[in-house]
Image (cartoon, helix red, strand yellow):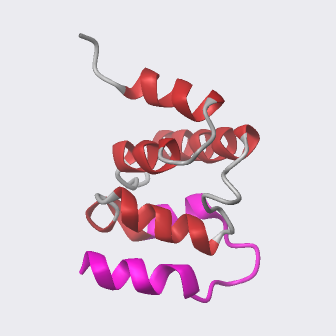
Amino acid sequence: MTSILRQVLPRICLLPNTTLPQVLVQLGHELTTDPEVIRALLQRFGLTDANPPKDMQVLEVISRMARYAVEGHQLCDIGALIRALASYVRESFVRSVWHCHSPLE
């Protein structure tokens, strides 16, 4: 299933103005446990190694996911989302979020 999602998600047709957090919530936890699946979805939104997410984009996604959690929505796998975002070249904000998400030693 994961390999199929990785092939389909970069080309999936979405309604106009559909946001990344909306799609992540629609996919749910079970379909988003693999960071590579989330990277495929990020590619659909134009985020790639050549065009990594900007700090503000990461902040918007995490903020919206937090709002969805408060509203009681089922979320995507947040750990996989953070790992997918942290896998891009950018170092600043994404790495900070990754360290905040890591368990304390």
Going 48% across and 62% down the picture, which residue do you hit? 39
> At which x and y percent is residue 6?
39, 77
Going 28% across and 13% down the picture, which residue do you hit? 104
Going 71% across and 38% down the picture, which residue do you hit? 55
> At which x and y percent is residue 89?
59, 44
- Residue 14 on the magenta span: yes
> At which x and y percent is residue 34?
30, 60
Placement of the N terminus among the 4 image quadrants: bottom left
Going 63% across and 84% down the picture, which residue do you hit? 14
Placement of the C terminus among the 4 image quadrants: top left
* Observer-nearest of 11 and 51: 51
Which residues, given as a range, are shown in magenta?
A: 1-26
Magenta stretch secondary structure, dominant = helix
Asked which quadrant contains residue 59, the reply is top right
Q: How many marks?
A: 0
Q: In this view, does 62 lie above or below 14?
A: above
The residue lying furthest to the top in this view is 105
Left or right: 64, with 41 as reference point: right
* Observer-nearest of 100 and 62: 100
- Residue 102 on the magenta span: no
Q: Is residue 88 above or below residue 18?
A: above
> At which x and y percent is residue 58?
64, 43
Left or right: 55, with 98 as reference point: right
* Observer-nearest of 103 and 20: 103
